[in-house]
Image (cartoon, grey):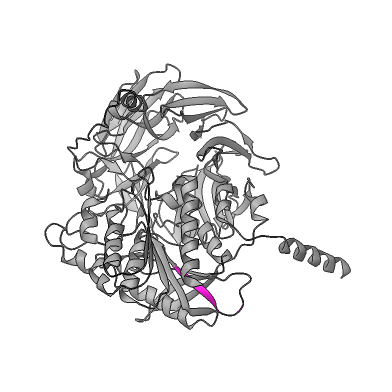
């Protein structure tokens, strides 16, 4: 008993030494991603991301011990090394090195480390994905060259001669993408490098370059999901599967796969036995990002029969969990088990990202990890008994884990501990789960985070997630922890429109934002106001993207908030339809069109009701945001100034994008958090 008491005292003392989390702690977090199990199952290859000394992110290639007995080691020094891939025999690692001048190179290094050597030097441009052929002879990758006038050398030459920045001449509908910038008429092309000979062959091009691919088991063919329609943005139906076959002299031939229903498709994966091809997608005209579930399909190449394996599950393979401590997984993740008997995938459900599987012949969905964490899939070992992943929780940033595939629920072992020293110093709050009933009887999933030192009634902030077709959940969110440390009780939920609760839940707001979603948010607000631990006179609402939309909608319809924050928002759906990098297809998601029948868009626009707004608002937006143009915040700012409502407008430079809070320049991410804290202190105290 005495020993136990001493241990308890030591634990209490250690806990008392913990400190509150700060904005600067965001820069101390170490990110890990893209985990790849070695063929023999002994090591995990991954990318490590840190904030370097010169206010820039540095990425390098690392290897962790799958038995978790030895510390991880660096394979490269970086600072811009990505897309690391094991060779099929596990003796070499190929990766992409991006130089400061933005000229990417394919490099190769021994699995033991040492000096990398160059396999291929490319012109200035961008690389997407990298994959060894199973025979080890080829490397496939996507590449998009930068137009000459936009290269770093051209810019330097203009500056030396005092010349102006040239105009952009656009002749197509897709010429920009948020975080990717302006690429005008340039497109990605799928290329194949002969590792021994060094020659490169371009094997596939499409309109948008939004394709994905996989090698056949014998290494003699690629399956590619792509859209050849010149108006691909308006015709998701035309996404098809193609087979690119290589002859004896490496010349390729491309053929369309037939007998497959029309609709968007992504992440095709060839079965290890070569008899089937699986992919994520849906049947119909909707894009991959929409209200319908993204399903798992498998095509039997011999019987020429396609089966949907998830149609009875109501799961969506694109239910992404949002966070500011890592890049959300917006692409489906699926992996064949090495014996071709089953397909494993990430399933977002009720705020968690879980590992699930289904037999290749069909059947019930099996879950292999529990709720309460976010998992991003890696790859299997050759024997299938180990699976790499990145796992995070609300109080633990993402770390590389190894899942032991031996029973129904996989045992997880942590292979990296990069963030342990920091987390051990911090007072963090574990969210508490609850379900709230909306006015029409619908149940809304919600979490609360109460400050550790809170006594009596405290101010509270409701966070609303973006999307809207995404979810909040059990992953590390620095901003939430920071607000708790500042003394605010934080509430967050997944109202109708979110992913992770079935297709009807998501589709409830299709073409009618501000209806069922607002009803659910109102239910959360009402519950907060009844909570005895909350000072109802000091409540605020905030959110980014669609969350900014809902913050705008809330202050136009509810005057009881002390203050609000609208971050990279949508305010006018009519103008947004014409200036976002994702154009609206008329009469698809919304009834009518912005230029023809804008009534539905206008009814759902918060700015249409802003004559009623009188809540002080902080507006945050990036001038380089191509998803939600900064004019969306400009409209709110003008309306508030016209009505003499207190407002503060923080405009970040053109070098930033829609994802500033999670991927922006480190110093500006800290500045943003400082603005948020200052705004709440100004109005809540």
Q: Is residue 314 visible?
A: no
The residue lying at 40 percent from left, 30 percent from top is 140
Q: Nearer the viewer, residue 488 or 406?
A: 488
Q: Nearer the viewer, residue 420 or 26?
A: 26
For the N terminus, which image quadrant?
Answer: bottom right
| Residue 281 screen position, x and y as percent | 32, 51
The residue lying at 41 percent from left, 75 percent from top is 561
The residue lying at 63 percent from left, 71 percent from top is 453
Q: Where 392 sits versus 130, above or below?
A: below
| Residue 108 screen position, x and y as percent | 51, 25
View extreme (front): residue: 644
Q: Nearer the viewer, residue 337 or 605?
A: 605
Residue 504: quadrant of the picture: bottom left
Q: Where 369 sits versus 146, above or below?
A: below
View extreme (top): residue: 197
View extreme (left): residue: 596
| Residue 238 screen position, x and y as percent | 22, 45
Is 547 a magenta residue? no
Q: Is residue 320 visible?
A: yes
| Residue 390 screen position, x and y as percent | 54, 49
Q: Where 405 sits versus 40, above or below?
A: below
The residue lying at 45 percent from left, 77 percent from top is 436
Dominant SS of magenta comes to strand
Q: Is residue 465 left or right of residue 16?
A: left
**From which residue to which does the magenta span run?**
455-462
């Amino acid at each position: 008993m005495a020993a136990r008491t001493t241990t308890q005292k030591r634990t209490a003392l250690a806990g008392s030494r913990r400190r509150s989390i700060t904005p600067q702690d965001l820069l101390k977090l170490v990110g890990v991603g893209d985990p790849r199990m070695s063929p023999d199952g002994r090591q995990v290859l991954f990318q490590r991301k840190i904030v370097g000394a010169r206010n820039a992110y540095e990425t390098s290639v690392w290897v962790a011990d799958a038995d978790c007995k030895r510390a991880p080691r660096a394979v490269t020094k970086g600072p811009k090394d990505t897309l690391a891939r094991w060779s099929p025999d596990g003796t070499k690692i190929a990766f992409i090195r991006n130089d400061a001048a933005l000229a990417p190179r394919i490099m190769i290094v021994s699995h033991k480390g040492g000096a990398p050597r160059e396999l291929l030097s490319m012109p200035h441009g961008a690389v997407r994905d990298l994959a060894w052929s199973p025979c080890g002879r080829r490397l496939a990758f996507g590449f998009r060259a930068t137009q000459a006038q936009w290269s770093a050398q051209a810019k330097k030459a203009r500056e030396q001669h005092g010349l102006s920045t040239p105009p952009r001449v656009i002749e197509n509908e897709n010429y920009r993408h948020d975080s990717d910038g302006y690429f005008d008429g340039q497109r990605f092309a799928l290329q194949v490098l002969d590792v021994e000979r060094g020659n490169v062959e371009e094997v596939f091009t499409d309109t948008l370059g939004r394709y994905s691919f996989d090698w056949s088991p014998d290494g003699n063919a690629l399956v590619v999901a792509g859209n050849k329609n010149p108006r691909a943005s308006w015709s998701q139906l035309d996404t098809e599967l193609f087979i690119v076959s290589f002859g004896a002299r490496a010349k390729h031939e491309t053929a369309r796969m037939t007998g497959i229903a029309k609709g968007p498709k992504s992440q095709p994966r060839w079965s290890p036995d070569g008899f089937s091809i699986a992919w994520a997608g849906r049947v119909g005209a909707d894009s991959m990002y929409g209200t319908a579930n993204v399903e798992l399909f498998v095509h039997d190449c011999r019987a020429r029969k396609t089966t949907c394996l998830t149609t009875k599950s109501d799961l969506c393979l694109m239910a992404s969990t949002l966070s500011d401590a890592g890049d959300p997984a917006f692409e489906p993740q699926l992996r064949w088990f090495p014996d071709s008997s089953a397909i494993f995938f990430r399933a977002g459900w009720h705020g968690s990202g879980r590992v699930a599987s289904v037999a290749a012949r069909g059947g019930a969905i099996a879950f292999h990890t529990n709720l309460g964490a976010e998992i991003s899939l890696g790859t299997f070992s050759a024997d299938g008994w180990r699976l790499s992943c990145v796992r995070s929780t609300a109080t633990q940033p993402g770390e590389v884990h190894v899942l032991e595939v031996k029973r129904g629920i996989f045992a997880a072992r942590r292979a990296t501990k990069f963030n342990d020293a920091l987390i051990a110093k911090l007072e963090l709050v574990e969210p508490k789960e609850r379900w709230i009933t909306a006015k029409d009887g619908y149940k809304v999933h919600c979490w609360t985070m109460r400050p550790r030192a809170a006594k009596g009634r405290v101010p509270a902030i409701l966070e609303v997630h973006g999307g809207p077709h995404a979810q909040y959940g059990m992953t590390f969110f620095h901003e939430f922890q920071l607000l708790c440390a500042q003394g605010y009780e934080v509430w967050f939920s997944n109202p109708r429109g979110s992913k992770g609760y079935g297709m009807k839940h998501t589709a409830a707001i299709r073409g009618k934002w501000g209806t069922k979603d607002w009803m659910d948010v109102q239910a959360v607000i009402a519950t907060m106001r009844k909570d005895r631990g909350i000072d109802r006179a000091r409540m605020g609402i905030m959110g980014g993207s669609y969350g900014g939309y809902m913050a705008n909608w809330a202050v136009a319809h509810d005057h009881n908030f002390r203050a609000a924050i609208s971050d990279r928002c949508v305010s006018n759906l009519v103008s947004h339809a014409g200036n976002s990098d994702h154009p609206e297809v008329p009469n698809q998601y919304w009834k009518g069109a912005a230029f023809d029948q804008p009534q539905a868009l206008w009814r759902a626009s918060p700015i249409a009701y802003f004559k009623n707004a009188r809540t002080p608002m902080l507006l945050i937006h990036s001038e380089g945001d191509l998803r939600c143009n900064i004019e969306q915040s400009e409209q709110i700012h003008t309306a508030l100034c016209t009505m003499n409502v207190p407002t503060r407008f923080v405009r970040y430079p053109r070098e930033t994008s829609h994802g500033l809070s999670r991927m922006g320049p480190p110093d500006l991410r800290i500045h943003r958090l400082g603005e948020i804290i200052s705004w709440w202190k100004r109005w809540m105290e």
